[in-house]
Image (cartoon, rainbow, N blue to C red):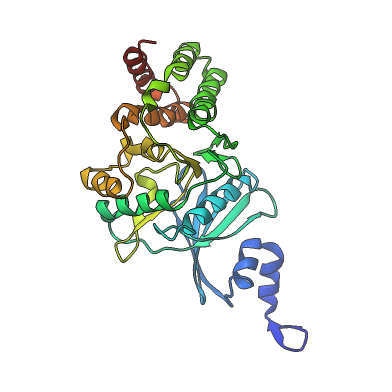
């Protein structure tokens, strides 16, 4: 037993743990736990490892990455906190981001016990719309830091105009990466033609910088034990609310979802014409992440728009 001052006694084993493990150190100090009763692995996806730390002060969800510094998790934490502060849809509250002693980084956040299903589609649509309605930026389109979409950098430089932001920092950035990685000049050239001619797609639409989750697919959507929707693993930024549906091709949004969403955030003129434009960003990103299997889907969207716009 080690005695600290006159009041607090800490077991030697705890002191040893604190000196070597910043995750346990935070949990046993700022996390207000006196003992960790168990650690179990949870599926963390293809980028990070994930664990649940169970303690006498409750459970904590921890993600670690042994290859990169804390900037990715710092971006995630800022996004989670921004969404949490809207008091709309449930997200895990982030607690701590830090570096690991040897290499890599970690994030500690609230552990949410998931229910048995992804929850009610109507409730998800309504809560997501409430978040979009509640959180608007006076800085324009972008975010406080650059972050990642999967493992791809996502540039969030504040920009006053949405079309400029989406052209340069979403479609344009992905097209440049594809050229660098795959030498695909054909999709780059056609993509740039679309960027230069897409203004008519936004005619009549009222666009505001809403807080977006940014990577809303089925793997990032769940529900808690009360059945309330939960969203996690964001790639947040402030953008056109319709861009939130860019991963709808693998999110499973149905009619109930959209009906509830549009009751809170009314559908804008031209919504159907723009829908594939927002899918395109994520198809391009998947091309960058996973290879040419996604090229045909991206090129098909680009070709369809070039025909529509006669560009």
Residue 60 point in image, percent of width and height:
51, 65
Compared to 188, does 53 lie above or below?
below
Number of numbered discs: 0
Residue drawn at the location 46% of the way across and 63% of the way down:
111
Quadrant occupied by the C terminus = top left
User: Which quadrant of the figure has residue 208?
Assistant: top left
In the image, 224 versus 4, the foreground residue is 224
Image quarter for residue 254?
A: top left
Q: Is residue 202 above or below residue 233?
A: above
Residue 48 sits above or below residue 123 on the image = above
Picture residue at 59% right of the left edge, 40% below the top: 146
| Residue 255, position as x, y percentages in the image | 21, 43
Horizontal arrangement in the rendering, residue 214 relative to residue 1 (left or right): left
Residues 1 and 54: in front is 54
Does any portion of residue 293 appear in the rendered image? no
Q: Which residue lies most toward the left here?
A: 255
Q: Residue at x 76, y 89 (%)?
A: 6
Where does the image place residue 195, in percent across and percent down from the top left?
46, 20
Which is nearer the eye, 207 or 226? Answer: 207
In the image, residue 64 sits, relative to residue 164, either above or below, namely below
Of residues 193 and 61, the one nearer the viewer is: 193
Q: Position of residue 226 (x, y in %)?
A: 31, 66
Rendered-image quadrant of the N terminus: bottom right
Q: Can residue 254 be seen here?
A: yes
Identify the residue at image location x=49%, y=30%: 166
């Amino acid at each position: 037993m080690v005695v600290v001052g006159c009041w607090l006694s800490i077991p030697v084993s705890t002191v040893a743990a604190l000196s070597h493990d910043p995750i346990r150190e935070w949990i046993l100090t700022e996390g207000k736990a006196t003992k960790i009763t168990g650690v179990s692995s949870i599926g963390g996806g293809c980028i990070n490892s994930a664990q649940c730390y169970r303690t006498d002060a409750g459970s904590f969800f921890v993600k670690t990455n042994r290859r990169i510094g804390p900037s990715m998790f710092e971006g995630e934490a800022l996004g989670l906190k921004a969404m949490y502060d809207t008091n709309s849809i449930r997200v895990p509250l982030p607690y701590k981001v830090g570096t690991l002693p040897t290499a890599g980084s970690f994030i500690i956040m609230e552990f949410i016990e998931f229910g048995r299903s992804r929850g009610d589609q109507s409730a998800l649509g309504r809560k997501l719309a409430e978040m979009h309605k509640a959180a608007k930026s006076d800085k324009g389109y972008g975010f406080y830091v650059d972050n990642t979409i999967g493992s791809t950098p996502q540039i969030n430089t504040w920009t006053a105009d949405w079309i400029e932001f989406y052209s340069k920092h979403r479609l344009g950035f992905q097209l440049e990466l594809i050229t660098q990685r795959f030498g695909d000049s054909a999709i780059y050239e056609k993509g740039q033609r679309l960027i230069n001619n897409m203004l008519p797609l936004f005619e009549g639409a009222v666009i505001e910088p809403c807080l977006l989750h940014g990577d809303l697919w089925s793997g990032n959507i769940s529900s808690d034990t009360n059945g309330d929707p939960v969203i996690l693993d964001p790639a947040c930024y402030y953008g056109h609310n319709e861009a939130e549906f860019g991963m709808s091709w693998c999110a499973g949004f149905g009619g109930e979802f959209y009906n509830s969403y549009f009751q809170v955030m009314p559908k804008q003129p031209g919504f159907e014409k723009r829908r594939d434009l927002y899918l395109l960003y994520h198809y391009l990103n998947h091309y960058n992440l996973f290879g040419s299997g996604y090229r045909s889907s991206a090129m098909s969207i680009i070709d369809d728009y070039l025909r529509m716009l006669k560009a």
